Amino acid sequence: MYFPAPCPTCHWENRAEFADSSIHDLTCSRCGARYCVLLRKHKFEVLFDLGTRALMDGYAREAVASFAASLERFLEFYVRAFVLERSAGSGREFGEVAQTFEATWKHVVSQSERQIGMFALAYLLREGQEPEFLSARALGSDFRNRVIHRGYLPTREEVEGYAAQVFELIDRLLTRLGGAASQPEVLQEREFQRHLAALPDTVIAVFEEHPGMFRARRFGGPSPASAEFPKSQLKGAASKPAKALNDARNYQQALFRQALEERGEGLKRFKGK
Ligand SMILES: [Zn+2]
């Protein structure tokens, strides 16, 4: 997947492929200038955007894989944010805590079930509550498995429903995280600085705040009218099949559609730059 990365010297619009590290060392194909594009965005945001793009382009099946991966990476993000938040003010050095976390995460990195276990404990410790949304039904796991492992071809509507579910969950947990969500951002900035320090002075650094769905909303984008919708209805949705479930689904879809529209606007702005 590519994104436009205009050259800071001659403004030629080069294209860059999303890198896992969010760091893109580029050479302009027109003037030959070297520059480095740093995406201020987390993995779960990139993956959710890729899913949205795939969905908009008509690749429903591919979109499911991206949305599912986005959710998994968000759970990791949550645990990381929790650990960093917890250690703040403990006297331990930020980088050391981060390193210990990364080393610990290696033990669970290849199995998503283990990661859900880590998340469940982090949520319990932080919120003092059961993560009731971790049921297979609430996570949409059956749908996801049917598509990814059994080759089911979903309709666009089904994928939108799934995306809305994932979106609502991430959005809700991000809101709960509040300021703690900025902890992993500090980490990312440090990695950016380390990378930049190793580059020759002639390389121009370009920081990109992409109009991701979540970040756009956190930084002053219009927030959905979540307060108008009683959370209890969302919570109880799984056990009350009839109206509550429909209401919850409609609410999720409305949230996602609104974000999708904002995203469309954001993309237009970004392309128009
Ligand atoms: Zn150039």
Image (cartoon, rainbow, N blue to C red):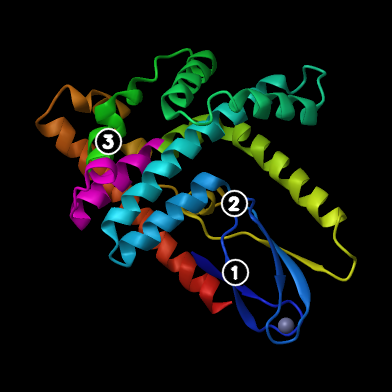
Q: Give the residue pinned by disc 1.
A: 16
- List the single residue furthest toward the right: 201
Helix, strand or loop: magenta stretch: helix
Does residue 49 appear to the left or right of 248 in the view shown? right
Along the viewing direction, whichever of 127 and 67 lies nearer the viewer: 67
Q: Secondary structure at mark 3?
A: loop
**Residue 204 rendering spot, x and y as whole percentages:** 80, 69
Could you give the CA–CA distance between mark 3 and mark 2, rounded to whole angstroms?
26 Å
Judge whether residue 59 is colored magenta: no
Q: Residue at x 89, y 64 (%)?
A: 200
Q: Does residue 182 sit above or below 259 in this rendering?
A: above
Q: Is residue 247 visible?
A: yes
Q: Secondary structure at mark 1?
A: strand
Does residue 17 appear to the left or right of 86 in the view shown? left
Give the residues in magenta.
147-169
**Mark 2 surroundings within 10 Å by alpha-carbon count, few (fewer than 14), some (14 through 19), many (20 or more):** few
**Residue 72 rendering spot, x and y as whole percentages:** 44, 36
Numbered label attached to residue 140: 3
Q: Give the residue pinned by disc 2.
A: 20
Residues at discs 3 and 1 in contact (Cβ within 8 Å): no
Q: Residue at x 54, y 68 (%)?
A: 3
**Residue 205 rendering spot, x and y as whole percentages:** 77, 64
Numbered label attached to residue 34: none
